[in-house]
Amino acid sequence: EPEVTQTPSHQVTQMGQEVILRCVPISNHLYFYWYRQILGQKVEFLVSFYNNEISEKSEIFDDQFSVERPDGSNFTLKIRSTKLEDSAMYFCASRHEGQANTGELFFGEGSRLTVL
Amino acid sequence: GQSLEQPSEVTAVEGAIVQINCTYQTSGFYGLSWYQQHDGGAPTFLSYNALDGLEETGRFSSFLSRSDSYGYLLLQELQMKDSASYFCAVSEDSSYKLIFGSGTRLLVRP
């Protein structure tokens, strides 16, 4: 069964360092999302991406965040200068255009970011 | 603002039925989804309601009342593996980005 894959599964970094989280969405999906979940809290929307551009972003997604689709398969989230409060699980999700009426997003297993 | 309210915890015994409620207040509404998340795992889609009424998928059912801004997830014949967190989530518009509730932690006991 096709799945969304994310790397790394866990990254530990020092405050102020740059981090890149990678995602490979399901191949025929056109809509991509990044969400984050601070330990024990709810899943929060960061950004959505369609047709090679950001379609929507939340207040959390400030200038230190960026997303790219560098090639036909990868979708990346970059955090330029990490802060302690960026420590969270970051989930990539995708959906096919035909799933617009089903409410279904396919989530990856997440990348746990720990900022020290 | 946006808010989705769910109970924080529910406990039930194996074989029982449990209902997890969700009330929402959002600027727009396209549909209400339910996701299951085991500890350390990814959210997994369970069900979706765009129109009023009940949707049934095996042991799980989901209900929506748009006029009441209310929905619930019904889990029947509970099994130990159903112990997890359950999130309701609203799609506000055609982007289908999801606004998640805070989640309900379900503990199923023998």
Image: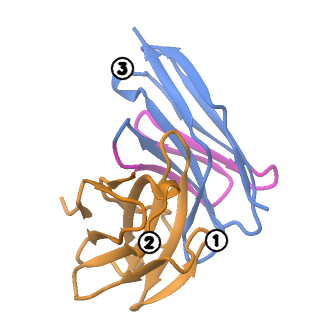
Chain colours: A orange, B blue
The residue sitting at 51% across, 39% down in the picture is A40
Give percent across and percent down for residue B67. Answer: 81, 54
Query: Farthest residue toward the top?
Result: B110
Please tell me which residue lies in front, B73 or A75.
Answer: A75
The range drawn in magenta is B41-69
In the rendered image, which residue does mark 1 sit on? A59
Query: Farthest residue toward the left?
Result: A1
Give percent across and percent down for residue B56. Answer: 49, 43
Residues tagged 1 and 2 counted as in contact (Cβ below 8 A): no
Q: Amino acid at mark 2?
A: Ser
Which label sits in the foreground, 2 or 3?
2
Alpha-carbon span between mark 3 and mark 1: 38 Å
In the rendered image, which residue does mark 2 sit on? A81
Which label sits in the foreground, 1 or 2?
2
The residue sitting at 48% across, 26% down in the picture is B76
**Circle 1 — which element?**
loop
Alpha-carbon span between mark 2 and mark 3: 42 Å
Please tell me which residue lies in front, B10 or A84.
Answer: A84
Give percent across and percent down for residue A41. Answer: 55, 43
Residues tagged 3 and 1 counted as in contact (Cβ below 8 A): no
| Residue B49 falls within the magenta-colored stretch | yes
Q: Quadrant of residue B6?
A: top right
**Circle 3 — which element?**
helix
Q: Amino acid at mark 3?
A: Met
Q: Chain of mark 2?
A: A
Please tell me which residue lies in front, A84 or B30.
Answer: A84
Please tell me which residue lies in front, B105 or B29.
Answer: B105
Q: Is the residue marked by circle 1 packed among few (<14), some (14-19), or many (20+) residues within 10 Å?
A: few
Residue B99, disc: none
In the rendered image, which residue does mark 3 sit on? B80
